Image: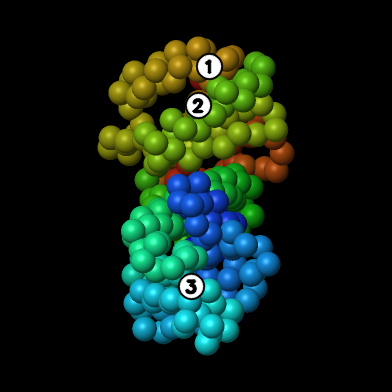
Amino acid sequence: MRVLRKHYLKGYTARQIVQRAMKIIPYSVNVMDEHGVIIASGEPSRLHQRHEGAILALKENRIVEIDSATANQLKGVRSGINLPISFHEQLIGVVGITGEPEQVRAYAELVKMAAELVIEHMVLIEQRQWDKRYREELINQLILRENSTESLRSMAAYLGIDLAVPRVVLIIELSQPDREALRNVMDYFENHARNHLVTFTEFNELIIIKPITLKEGKWNTRQEMGELQMFKSWAASSGFSRILVGAILPARRDCTVLCSPPGPPRRWRKDKSCAASTFFIMTTRSPRC
């Protein structure tokens, strides 16, 4: 299972910091990595140089001001202010503003705050991208049985998904592909129903693995009908032609694999070997709502 890397300050992120900072202040900005090497700069000729002021800022975890006289004695350094930047209490690099300290001091904290906000934003985007990939992979593995139960549990735990919860499979068919409709769908589940597993197939079908409540080991379809009707109304307005609903098998905590033969979802049918699985299998005779 992949975890988010601790190397938060990447080249692309550093360039974003420089570009945004130099839009609001009239001085050149540099970003140095955790080794004090310049990885982004308003002066491209300085890229990949070791910055002694940044190394000192990292070593002592403090703001380092360098005037012209001091700069002449150091390697790869010009006058300016260098501020260590942190993320999740981890020292990850330095942002520097080139200029005489008394001239650029007023901008120092502003640039540091802007840098840390850019890093936080970029890490959040990366995290969401990995979450999306893992959700899609989890659905694929549940459907195709391509991995071990332990692997599924590990991936589900990372996503905060409880595989012991019984679920039903919904397949919503799309009459005509509509990217805007699909984007709205994915945004809805991302923000309001993260316990649902959702993916879109090459057959213009949206697969939703939806948690349900069992009463005395049985799925009360009447209780769920209101939500299914909501799905129906929403799907129709979003360009989807129909909804297929799977059935539910009794859940077992030691067996959480969705069973189906390989092939497109429309060919799914019951598999007797899945009698102890958490999920029911979509069939061509499934009720339509």
For badge 3, the amino acid type reads Ser
Q: N-terminal of the two: label 2 or label 3?
A: 3
Residue occupying the point 47% across, 65% down: 99
As measured in the structure, the alpha-carbon distance from the residue carrying label 3 to the one carrying label 1 is 58 Å
Residue tagged 3:
79
Nearest to viewer (mark 1 / mark 2) = 2
- Check disc 2: other Cα within 10 Å, few if <14, some if 14-19, many if 20+: few
As measured in the structure, the alpha-carbon distance from the residue carrying label 2 to the one carrying label 3 is 50 Å
Q: Position of residue 204 (x, y in %)?
A: 66, 26
Side of 152 where 195 appears, left or right: left
Q: Position of residue 259 (x, y in %)?
A: 58, 45
As measured in the structure, the alpha-carbon distance from the residue carrying label 1 to the one carrying label 2 is 9 Å
Residue occupying the point 70% across, 43% down: 262
Q: N-terminal of the two: label 3 or label 1?
A: 3
Q: Nearer the viewer, residue 127 or 199?
A: 127
Is residue 135 something one can see in this rendering? no
Residue occupying the point 28% across, 37% down: 216
The quadrant where residue 228 appears: top left
Residue tagged 1:
238
| Disc 2 secondary structure class | helix
- Check disc 1: other Cα within 10 Å, few if <14, some if 14-19, many if 20+: some
Residue tagged 2:
184
Q: Position of residue 164 (x, y in %)?
A: 38, 50
Q: N-terminal of the two: label 1 or label 2?
A: 2
Residue 167 sits above or below residue 86 on the image: above
| Disc 3 secondary structure class | loop
Is residue 146 something one can see in this rendering? yes
